Image: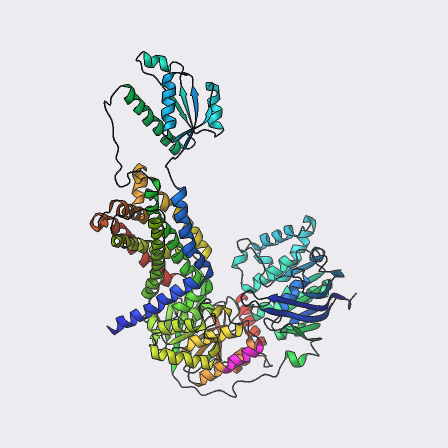
Amino acid sequence: MDGFRAFLRKLKFMIKKELLATIKDPRTRTILFLPVIMQTMLFGYAATFNLDEVQYACLDQSRSKYSTELIAKMEGSGVFRRVQTLNSTSEIAEAIDSDVAMLVVNIPADFADKLVAGERAEVQVITDGRNSSTSGIAAGYVNSIVADYNARRNGGRILETETIAWYNPNLITRWMFLPALIPMMSLSQVLMLAGLSVAREREQGTFDQLLVTPIEPSIILIGKAISPILIGLIQATFALIIMCVWFEIKVVGSLFTLYLVLLVFLLSCVGIGLSISAVSANMQQVMVYCFMAMMPLSLLSGVTTPVRNMPQVLQYFTLANPLRFATEAVRRIFLEGSSLATVAYALVPMLLIAGITLPVAGWFFRNKL
Amino acid sequence: MTGKNVIISKNICKSFIDKRSKKEIVALENINIGIPHGRLTALIGPDGAGKTTFIRMVCGLLVPSSGSLEVLGMDVLAEPQAVQDRISYMPQRFGLYEDLTVMENMVLYADLHNVPQGERQARFARLLHMTGLAQFTESLAGKLSGGMKQKLGLACTLVRAPELLVLDEPTVGVDPLSRRELWEILQQLVKDDELTVLVSTAYMDEADLCSKVIIFNEGKLLAEDTPENLREYLHPPKEVAFTGVRSLPDKFVIEVRNLVRKFGDFVAVDDVSFQVREGEIFGLLGPNGAGKTTTFRMLCGLLPASSGYLAVAGLDLRTARTQARANIGYVAQKFSLYPTLTVDENMNFYGGVYGLDDERLRERMAAVKEQFDMAELSDKEAGELPGGYKQRLSMAVALLHEPRIIFLDEPTSGIDPVARRNFWKQITALAAEGKTIIITTHFMEEAEYCDRIMIQDQGRMLALGTPKEIREQAGVASDDMNEAFIAIVEKSRGEKEV
């Protein structure tokens, strides 16, 4: 019991020192809160797939009542804004190439005749494939307007699909992105903080001074892990507040579950960070390794593109990525209101990663030359 | 030409504004000196005396606050580039490319200085011969020893023939053997090429090798004369710490038997055995790369031994590293407490991890602050303390938990002679209390303060005994420890080659 009390006492001193050293270092102090606010705001506004306005060019060769009706329908939707009116097919290429329009609607001369004859009439939509996702979305908008027009003309609705997006009824990209931002941001920050903390001590020579004390390696490890986790949780809270207050996204699930997931996730991040730190000789190396790790971790996480769309091989890789599971779990808690039991599966791989990386880091502290 | 001054400094002043305190710091005050052509001139003074500031101004890298400075007949303030084209400057940390070989470094510097291809071969050959690097041209610069790196730095500085050579503390942290070789090169350059050389140094004994000595202290010119006339200042009467040999108890606190440490194929410490008694001051001496740091790190438990027996305070370091560490205090060569934490925060932390309870921690903190005269500095950031105080803080922290053994790694490098003398007074007082002191140093005269010293070279133990015994073993008549050291190392290297 006394041994345990002594252990806790030493740990208390270690954690206090770690927090002091992080907060007092002007270099780390600046990365504590500013990036959180900046990234949350940027992601909230900039990262969006929603097209509020489609700038398009119109080539109406039919010049009929029907074609005017269709165009009026498009422009009446509030999404399509005509930026150019073309007179011949030869002008199409120029409109797209010059980036003036992202989409050209070409209504052929026989459009009205075919409709009157009861034949199938065609409308050509040319999109700018240089940005495949926006052009896809814009083309989708045209499709739905055309479908609507068809239904009206046929005098009734024969078959209609009605899409309801659960958990995000208006399909606002921000709702999908911002919750995922919390783990992603925590990952980059905590990886750096944990990574730099040992490397900084090595560079300053303080690590040797620490190693000659009778302090147990486990205390160093726990002390070095807890301080970045605490900072990570505070940063997450910061981001959470901005999301709820500024962007008005509601957390449907319980905050307790959310924080539990974040805690386990941060544990695995710290494990990776400390392992990077343990094998690096200096702070510069830590930075390089961290950037090298960040890229695949975020690409293979499902933050921006769904894991399900990746090739099977890459999907296997995502199983070793704590960010993938954290993103999944956080989104579900945030938007679905999933209970702890439903997201518990995501905790297992994260705990495994922490369980491997932390002891590895601890071993390296002592045994690296 | 000899006798004409190539550097003429008139009323040179320089002050800086300290960024944190916003106070003005005077680095140099009214410096009036002349440096003669074709001679070797030494600029001497403790750290912070203004040596580097003056040298950087001579090279046109710093602008004086007031006064005039003429170098090679030109006004440095008006035409710094013209001056730089005709001088060679070797800063304290010369920029060698560690991943390039010796030859590649030289070629690179020759390219940078536009040395014509035709002149290179002869010049390189001479420089390599002079610096003794001829057989190492294909070695990576990063793999060279400290002394050899300095010599390569000098060779790179001299790839073009300058009219004035300026060196900023080229011998700092270099072992006595390499130091002597560096000075021989400089003297040869002055003799053969009539080169004018200005060297700054913190070693008083090096001044004897120059024809003119300039002494700076706290930004002021203290003296400007020949070494003969400055004998009093350069060689103050020695204070002998002990008269005779102290009687020490026959209790060993450190036992080392057949200690070996290998890094791959390289044997850094080769079969070393010795014992240290309680209350003894034990010095580890050796050139750079001799294995003394490796030995030292193994004793502190920072590095596991490859083989051999190693016990500290009666505890085997293989089995009881953590417990053994509770008995030792450690002061690293480089200041290694947390610079952003205050004095009290540092003490609090180290006291805490050494397991002192609140009451004892308070008591000990007050006691060591009293002992090292730093009670007023409690709330100062450790990194902001002046050099001497950093040293004291490191000592204070190492003594917080009242260890039986204190390890000091080159504690006196980079502090001025007065502070060094005070430091040794404290060390001898600690030893008198019964604390065991293990110390490494490259100041040979400091070996006199030790009860016993061990000299290492190339991993092997060459000599072990009292300073007197070592001198006798070396067969040196004078009481100069420097000579004894060089004699022992050279003798052993000579035997090895035969």
Q: Residue at x 59, y 83 (%)?
A: B238
Give B433 or A339, whichever is nearer the viewer. A339
Of the 4 image quadrants, the one containing the N terminus of chain A is: bottom left
Give B98 or B429, whichever is nearer the viewer. B429
Q: Where residue B178 sits: x, y (%)? A: 58, 67
Q: Residue at x 72, y 58 (%)?
A: B78
Of the 4 image quadrants, the one containing the C terminus of chain A is: bottom left
Q: Is residue A326 in view?
A: yes
Give A267 or A119, whichever is nearer the viewer. A119
Q: Where residue B225 sits: x, y (%)? A: 71, 75
Q: Is residue B11 left or right of residue B320?
A: right
Magenta region, residue range: B413-425
Position of residue A94 relative to residue B157, above or below, is: above
Q: Is residue B190 left or right of residue A159?
A: right
> Which residue is outermost to the left?
A341
Colour option used: rainbow
Q: Is residue B184 in view?
A: no
Q: Is residue A314 magenta?
A: no
Q: Is residue B419 magenta?
A: yes
Prevailing secondary structure of the magenta residues? helix
Q: Residue at x 39, y 16 (%)?
A: A64
Position of residue A105 relative to residue A165, above or below, is: above
Q: Is residue A253 left or right of residue B120?
A: left
Q: Where residue B455 sits: x, y (%)? A: 50, 74
Q: Residue at x 34, y 79 (%)?
A: B359
Residue B177, quarter of the rendered image? bottom right
Residue B67, quarter of the rendered image? bottom right
Q: Where residue B141 sits: x, y (%)? A: 55, 57
> Which residue is outermost to the top?
A117
